[in-house]
């Protein structure tokens, strides 16, 4: 079965799909993206992802490449055509193709690419035993709330984590506070037992998973405090976690080589994680209880 990729209105064979060399995404990272989870062939949280895409586009004054409904159709088509059961949809919108010049070009149409592929969920070992992180300086720009494709600092941070043999890098700002992970949001259970994740602002991305878990916690009466926490507080925390579309929610059991938590349970996932994980699983189960997905339109011919 060959993979299919959507590029500017056409469904193409993945190997042949490409964009113009003067696409501003390629030359200036002048674009935004979304990563959306697929479980059991269903797309999770499509609306909040498309809402965030709209916000990112507006922040950069890039026009929406198409209306919401047709874009939803493309996303669903990509999942069906690529037979994705568990995986991700990647969606990228750039300012489009124009002769290279820094200022916005006039009358350029935004370019859109959508891919879908299978991706295994986090391993059972990661879910059960947890993952490790390192901390690195946050060297990113001042608008990390925009889901920009300019990800070089994130790439470098994740590479450091990979080289260190750990799952994620937590980014630490000039004040010594953790902003978020290279591609996830960061949470701790502080020494007083408060579940804490950093408040939204321009320093971090408002994660869809973060928002979903905040809602689930609110519904379940689990108090979450949204404020900055320092690397030192994270090192002294009872528990730590990461959330993202691809990680879902995973326990963090070591930070910079130091076990999270105290006493005999140090370095082991804690009770708050167990509760949050159950809330997350219940939320996904509810989402999957809907009707199975079918292609919404007669498949168009592959170019
Ligand atoms: N990254 N923070 C950053 C910097 C991210 O890149 C991501 C997601 C998140 C979590 O957001 P969400 O819960 O909406 O996935 C937080 C995606 C998965 C990626 O770049 O692959």
Image (cartoon, grey):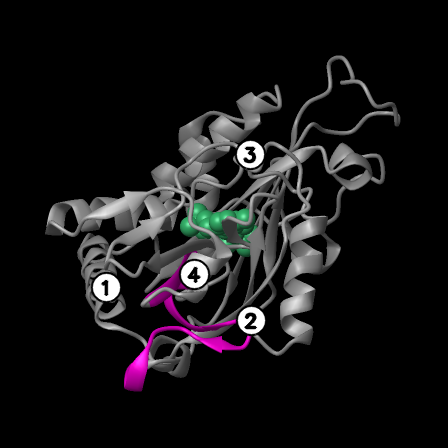
- Report which quarter residue 167 is drawn in: bottom right
Q: Is residue 5 above or below residue 70?
A: below
Categorize mark 4 by other alpha carbons within 10 Å: few (<14), some (14-19), many (20+): many
Residue 88 placement (x, y as % from top left)? 48, 58
C-alpha separation, residue under disc 2 versus residue under disc 4: 10 Å
Q: Is residue 214 left or right of residue 143?
A: left
- Decide: is 5 above or below 277: above
Question: Which mark identifies residue 146?
Answer: 3
Distance from Cα at disc 3 to Cα at disc 4:
25 Å
Magenta stretch encompasses residue 263: yes
Residue 234 disc label? 4
For numbered disc 1, what is the local secondary structure?
Answer: helix
Taking depth in this image into account, of 245 and 225 the one nearest to the observer is 225
Which stretch is magenta?
239-265
The quadrant of the picture occupied by the N terminus is bottom right
Residue at 29% x, 61% y: name it.
Answer: 191
Label 2 sits on residue: 256
Q: CA distance from mark 4 to mark 1?
A: 25 Å
Tag 1 residue: 281
Q: Is residue 109 found inside the magenta-colored segment of the image?
A: no
Q: Residues within 10 Å of mark 3 (few under 14, many from 20)?
A: many
Label 2 and label 3: CA atoms lie apart by 28 Å
User: Which mark is in front, 1 or 2?
Assistant: 2
């Amino acid at each position: 079965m060959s993979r299919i990729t959507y590029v500017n209105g056409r469904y193409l064979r993945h190997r042949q799909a490409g964009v113009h060399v003067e696409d501003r995404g390629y030359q200036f990272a002048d674009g935004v993206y979304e990563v959306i989870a697929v479980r059991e062939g269903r797309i999770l949280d499509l609306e909040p992802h498309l809402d965030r895409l709209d916000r990112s586009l507006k922040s950069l004054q890039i026009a929406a490449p198409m209306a919401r409904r047709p874009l939803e159709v493309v996303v669903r088509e990509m999942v069906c055509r690529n037979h994705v059961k568990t995986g991700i949809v990647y969606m990228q919108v750039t300012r489009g193709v124009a002769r290279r010049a820094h200022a916005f070009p006039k009358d350029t149409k935004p370019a859109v690419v959508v891919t879908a592929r299978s991706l295994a969920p986090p391993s059972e070992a990661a879910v059960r035993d947890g993952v490790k992180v390192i901390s690195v300086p946050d060297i990113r720009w001042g608008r990390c709330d925009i889901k920009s494709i300019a990800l070089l600092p994130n790439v470098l941070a994740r590479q450091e984590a990979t080289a260190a043999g750990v799952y994620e890098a937590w980014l630490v700002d000039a004040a010594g506070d953790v902003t978020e992970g290279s591609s996830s949001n960061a949470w701790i259970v502080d020494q007083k037992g408060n579940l804490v994740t950093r408040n939204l602002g321009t320093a971090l991305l408002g994660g869809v998973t973060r928002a979903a878990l905040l809602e689930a916690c609110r519904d379940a009466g689990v108090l979450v405090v949204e404020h900055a926490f320092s690397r030192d507080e994270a090192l002294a925390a009872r528990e730590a976690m990461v959330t993202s579309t691809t990680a879902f929610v995973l326990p963090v059991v070591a930070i910079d080589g130091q076990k999270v938590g105290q006493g005999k349970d140090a370095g082991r996932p804690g009770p708050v994680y167990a509760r949050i994980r159950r809330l997350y699983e219940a939320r996904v189960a509810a989402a999957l209880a809907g009707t199975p997905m079918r292609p919404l339109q007669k498949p168009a011919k592959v170019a």
